[in-house]
Image: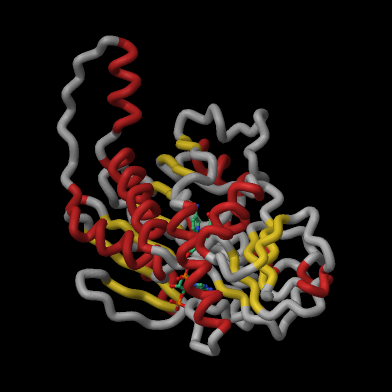
Amino acid sequence: MSVLAVITPTWNTLEWVTRLRKVLPQMDVRGWPGLGDLSEITHAACWLPPHGLLADLPNLKLIVSLGAGVDAFLRDETLPKHIPLVRVVDDDLTGRMSEYVLLQVLLHHREQRRLDANQRLGKWDSFAARAAKDFSVGVMGLGVLGQDAAKKLAMMGYRVRGWSRSPKQISGIECFSGAAEFSTFLSGTDILVCLLPATQDTQGILNRMLFSQLSRKGPFGAPILINAGRGRLQNEADILACLDDGTLHAASLDVFGQEPLPPDSPFWRHPKMTVTPHCAADSDPAAICAYVARQISKFDVGLPIDNIVDRSVGY
Ligand code: NDP
Ligand code: OXD
């Protein structure tokens, strides 16, 4: 019998074992710690597995990430190179990320923070809101999540542009790619939405040099940053300094270099910041388990599996 190891140190492993047993009744599903004889493990479903653990499973044939981003797996230098690593792509997760992006873009565009402050003061200040068409939103990363968010932003009336590694043509979105078109992409962006994976090429990309290339011609006279990709993409000292000196008008961050964000982080109380605890796209566990079961079932009968990570590019 095939044996599935469920390795989720920061989640409730028992709950994931129970869910996966339901959708994979043909497998022996075991939770970590307590995997038993490691040589019996053939498949692994994981989120943030301890480095070195997967390399200790001599008969492992398939690794499924329980999340979309696989940077934590790829930072494990011992991760077996010959075993396919599959990541999550799921409509439920994608839809939730676009909800987050729309929420944050609208929050800034409609100045909801100002309205909240006025409400607390009992102040009736009915200033005129701008229209969506007054803003150019630039989406960094036009993959599964970036494309969905970009299309939904365009449907709302925003002028939308996107940037990716390889060239794209997407109806209603002005597309830019690669290093050569990066400055042009940035110079026309009032609200920057980052949905990039964290890779060797993208680490620290959200820094002062980038922020200073964004448009200052938008309705607020300075750009807005929204990052739901990964904390490793951002230089946090630069974000704080740029909020303070006006290089950035405001920021919404869902991801951080250190998670949970420490209680003494200046981000929590900064007046221009919106902080969310890496929950932009907390997906439905039932949908994720159904996806895992589909991939394992296909793999086990020799059918092609979906969304295998390209280790050469890191996503
Ligand atoms: P995809 O792999 O589908 O898309 C990644 C996109 O980034 C692609 O368009 C790719 O370009 C682009 N890209 C990668 N490297 C570069 C580069 N060096 N320069 C320019 N563009 C680049 O990923 P998803 O859309 O599914 O997910 C994106 C990320 O979102 C995940 O990796 C994860 O970190 C994060 N995430 C965060 C969540 C949260 O709750 N906060 C939830 C889920 C995911 P190309 O199209 O040319 O390949
Ligand atoms: C993911 C995440 O990558 O939740 O799926 O961050």
- Image side of residue 188 versus residue 157, left or right: right
Furthest toward the top, the residue is 122
Quarter of the rendering occupied by the N terminus: bottom right
Q: Is residue 202 above or below residue 50?
A: below
* Front position in the image: 54 or 185: 54
Indicate the position of residue 225 as horizontal and vertical percent values: 43, 49
Q: Quadrant of residue 261?
A: top right
Q: Nearer the viewer, residue 130 or 146?
A: 146
Q: Nearer the viewer, residue 134 or 106?
A: 106
Q: Residue at left 39%, top 54%?
A: 97
Q: Is residue 279 left or right of residue 92?
A: right
Camera sees residue 168: yes
Q: Is any part of residue 216 visible from this angle?
A: no
Q: Give the residue drawn at x 62%, y 54%.
A: 17
Name the spot of residue 271 as percent of width and height, x first. Answer: 47, 29
Quadrant assignment for the C terminus: bottom right
Left or right: 109 with respect to 224?
left
Determine whether, in the image, residue 172 is placed left or right of residue 142.
Answer: left
The percent coordinates of residue 224 (x first, y second) are 39, 47
At horizontal 41% and vertical 71% (from top left) the residue drawn is 143
Residue at 34 percent across and 20 percent down: it is 117
Task: Pick whichever, 49 or 250, lies toward us.
Answer: 49
